[in-house]
Image: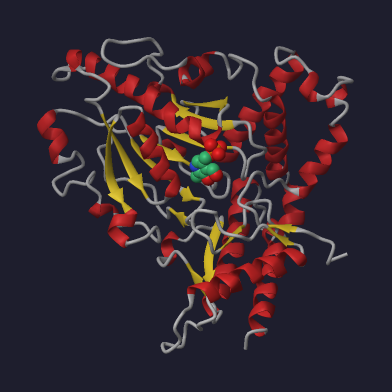
Amino acid sequence: AAAAHKWNFGAGPAMIPRPVLERAQAEFLNYNHTGVSLMELSHRSEAYENLNNKAQSQLRTLLHIPQNYKIIFMQGGGHTQFAAVVYNLIAWRHQQNKVQHRVNADQETWKNIPVDYIVTGSWSAKAAEEAKRLGANVRVVCDAKKQLGAYKGIPAESTWTTSDPEGALRREDRATGQTPAYLYYCDNETVNGVEFPFVPSMHDPAVPLVCDMSSNILSRPVDVSKFGVIYAGAQKNIGPAGVSVVIVREDLLQTSEAQDGVLPVPLMLDYKTMVKNNSLYNTPPMFAIYMSSLVFDWLLDPKAQKVQDGAYFERELVGVEAAAARNDRKASKLYKALEESRFCRVVVTDPAARSKMNVPFRISAAPKNDPAAVPNKAEDEKMEAAFVAKAEAMGLLQLAGHRSVGGIRASIYNAMTEEGVDVLIAFLKEFESQYR
Ligand code: PLP
């Protein structure tokens, strides 16, 4: 039976715990005694409205989301949020500037209002590119590739140009009287395996933090009150692709209307319209939201967490706290095994910035403890391909790195059990022993 079991190390979409899939299968034809499948119900029905509200309140419980934050379900994935944050927050900042009679607020245009980006990997780079493409005044306040030579860590916050030794407000902004609309970062870079071990704090507190948590939401507790906007495409730790979760601080929902100088927010990107309509402005991705709600149930169910969580249940952890304890153990044993291996090199060299969700590494036939060994790129790539193929044959699926960077990537989201990580480590050792 063990050989037939499949362990899915893919980066997405979507990693769903097995018991959740089984429950969805059982409920597929007859949702909650309605006699029809959930996806056939009207999204204006009471049954669906209840589900919509339930999913929101489950997420509020799981992440301890304060009451002054709204939860929205949107479509279009992470890429759509790259654009949505630009429209919504520039409109908000422009309105703030006018209300506060800031210098030249009346002549202000879309291009005058800066937006700040911390770039630590390919997803934050793409988000900054999209903002630029939309004509925003993008300032990259930290470029990890430039500073470190590659996406392999997070430069200290004191080196970012948001940080001013004389205080939170950068000198340039003080001179122009211009405050950026937001400061953006990606909490976990899915492709590069870089995860923030801290929440940025050295910027002007009047600038809302916007964070892409697509690939690590629900993997560890987060202090939501530090953020203006948190968003996540569902398809890693939440549910199937098709829905994105947006958590937005209420006071940022100022206007959706056209204002002099800045563009109106397209309705389908507009946080205020979504909040006003309780995420039911148009037909929502009902099935994806339903599946997400089943995942939330699973996280909130102590019995389910007991099965998954072994000893930690005895400490009565459930929810995100239980997932975080499990994720810590999974990641630390995997990184330890990679460190001890003669052939594996973890791509992210700064241990503090290593992701607990996506673990990219390289394999080289030149042992890393032998300074005389010269790596051969073609040989190494062959070895990596052999690793992926042999793993696949053993039921360890989707271990190839992202197509843009190559190598190996083991994604160990909430749905990956500790046992699965143990199986991967055993496979690693076995593979290596063949090369001794
Ligand atoms: N942000 C992060 C961190 C991601 O991992 C991804 C996709 O994997 C995206 C954004 C883009 O999401 P989507 O494919 O839903 O547009």
| 350 vs 431: above or below | above
Q: Is residue 410 left or right of residue 209?
A: right
Kindly indicate the quadrant of the structure image that contains residue 279.
Answer: top right
Whether residue 85 is situated above or below residue 276 in the rendered picture: below
Q: Residue at x 40, y 65 (%)?
A: 350
Residue 148 occupies which quadrant of the picture?
A: bottom left
> What residue lies at 31% left-to-right and 51% top-to-bottom?
143
- Say if 253 sits above or below 407 in the image: above
Q: Quadrant of the N terminus?
A: bottom right
- The count of marks equals 0
Q: Quadrant of the C terminus?
A: bottom right
Q: Position of residue 140 (x, y in %)?
A: 28, 43
Task: Name the side, left or right, on which 413 lies relative to 395.
Answer: left
Q: Nearer the viewer, residue 315 or 176?
A: 176
Outermost left residue: 175
Q: Residue at the spot x=62%, y=67% of the render?
A: 385
Q: Position of residue 159 (x, y in %)?
A: 24, 54
Q: Is residue 122 left or right of residue 15?
A: left
**Residue 51 seen in this snapshot:** yes
Residue 12 or residue 313, whichever sits in front: 12
Q: Is residue 213 visible?
A: no
Q: Residue farthest to the front?
A: 378
